[in-house]
Image (spheres, grey):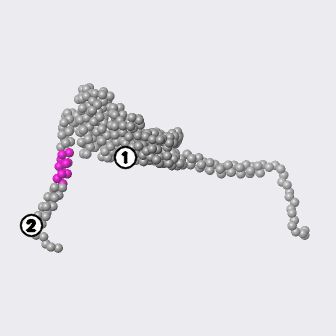
């Protein structure tokens, strides 16, 4: 190895330091800019509202907005929109406070007076809240609060927004549900059911078929999990029926035929689970009826020539009910045989006729 002169070494080290500094500087600058933006947004709030947001207490934030608005729905909408912007900025550094602030803002725009008087602010609150509750950091920090935020936001979207915004919020909600299905399956299924129900209208399917297809696809993945069927079998049955009907809509089916077939298969699997059948015996027949109709739907078959064969393949799967019935009949057969044997023994034991003495047959000469 050749020796390196001290001056050369100094130049190399300086160059390396400069290179590292040039690479790291944009990161530092971005972090500083984000911090400055967050500070500026928080600073733009009225002092009382700023303190409420920093407290991370949703009821306090909500009460402060109501007090500052003085009963003016437009002002309440404007303050809620300002708070939700702060919440989104806080998400990277303080997700718990972000969730609380977003929850307060959504509760304010839940008021129909605010929705009517401040429609743009209401839409902004709803769409921003959806970005917050679907974020991995929010779900990881407080999945229960995040699920509650998604439920509230979706309710406001159903009451105040058009099909496109509603489908977008529902898509975010069902994605959040999928993220919490392992930790809180009951809440996940309920949120998925709400999301599916919100996009079940034909007008929504026509306006946003791709997003509606995504909602149905994600919900179908949720309902086939064993935990979902165990804790919420009735809701699983409801979702299975709904998603099957949704993807049978030609507009939704045409948006993603392969996804639609997968949803049908998952729904059929879900309603075949014993716990679901026990909770909702009619669900299986309803899903089968919908699939049978879909297999002969001209519009679906024109979109996908293999549609009838694929659906018939789904319907050809044995259901849990059939398996259980066969097993029961097989198990009962030995019981009938045993009973018959017992009856024979009883008849033999209760025979009162004297035994008949048989004459022995001699095969040899008498001695």
Residue at the far right: name it: 366
Give the answer, above or below, for where 6 lies relative to 307.
below
Q: Position of residue 184 (x, y in %)?
A: 39, 44
Residue 155 magenta-highlighted: no
Question: Which quadrant holds the C terminus?
Answer: bottom right
Callout 1 crowding tier (Cα within 10 Å): few <14, some 14–19, many ≥20: many
User: In screen coordinates, is 108 left or right of 206?
Assistant: left
Query: Looking at the picture, how far across and down is residue 165, in whole percent?
Result: 33, 37
The mark found on residue 179 in the picture is: 1
Q: Secondary structure at mark 2?
A: helix
**Residue 310 visible in rendering:** yes
Cα distance between the residues tagged 2 and 1: 57 Å
The dominant secondary structure in magenta is helix
Find out whether residue 33 is within the magenta segment. Answer: yes
Residue drawn 21% across the image and 36% down it:
50
Image height of 266 relative to 199, above or below: below
**Residue identified by numbered label 2:** 7
Residue at screen point 26% across, 37% down: 84
């Amino acid at each position: 190895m050749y020796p390196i002169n001290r001056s050369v070494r100094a130049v190399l080290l300086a160059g390396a330091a400069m290179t590292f500094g040039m690479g790291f500087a944009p990161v530092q600058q971005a972090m500083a800019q984000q911090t400055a933006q967050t500070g500026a947004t928080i600073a733009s709030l009225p002092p009382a509202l700023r303190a409420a947001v920093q407290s991370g207490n949703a009821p306090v934030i909500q009460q402060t907005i109501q007090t500052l608005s003085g009963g003016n729905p437009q002002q309440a909408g404007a303050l809620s929109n300002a708070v939700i912007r702060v919440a989104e900025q806080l998400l990277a550094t303080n997700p718990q406070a972000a969730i609380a602030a977003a929850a307060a803002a959504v509760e304010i725009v839940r008021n129909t007076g605010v929705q009517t008087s401040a429609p743009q602010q209401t839409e902004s609150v709803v769409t921003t809240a959806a970005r917050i509750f679907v974020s991995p950091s929010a779900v990881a920090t407080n999945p229960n609060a995040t699920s509650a935020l998604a439920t509230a936001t979706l309710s406001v979207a159903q009451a105040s927004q058009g099909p496109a915004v509603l489908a977008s919020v529902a898509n975010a909600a069902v994605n959040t549900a999928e993220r919490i299905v392992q930790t809180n399956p009951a809440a996940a299924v309920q949120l998925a059911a709400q999301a599916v129900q919100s996009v079940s209208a034909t007008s929504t399917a026509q306006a946003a078929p791709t997003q509606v297809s995504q909602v149905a696809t994600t919900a179908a993945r949720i309902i086939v999990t064993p935990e979902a069927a165990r804790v919420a079998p009735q809701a699983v049955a409801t979702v299975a029926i709904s998603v099957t009907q949704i993807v049978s809509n030609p507009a939704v089916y045409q948006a993603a035929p392969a996804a639609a077939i997968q949803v049908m298969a998952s729904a059929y699997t879900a309603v075949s689970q014993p716990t679901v059948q026990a909770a909702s015996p009619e669900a299986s027949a309803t899903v089968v009826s919908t699939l049978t109709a879909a297999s002969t739907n001209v519009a679906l078959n024109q979109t996908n020539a293999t549609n009838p064969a694929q659906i018939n393949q789904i319907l050809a799967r044995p259901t849990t009910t059939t398996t259980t019935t066969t097993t029961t009949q097989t198990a009962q057969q030995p019981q009938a045989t045993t009973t018959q044997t017992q009856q024979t023994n009883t008849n033999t034991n209760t025979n009162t006729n004297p035994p008949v003495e048989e004459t022995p047959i001699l095969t040899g000469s008498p001695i």
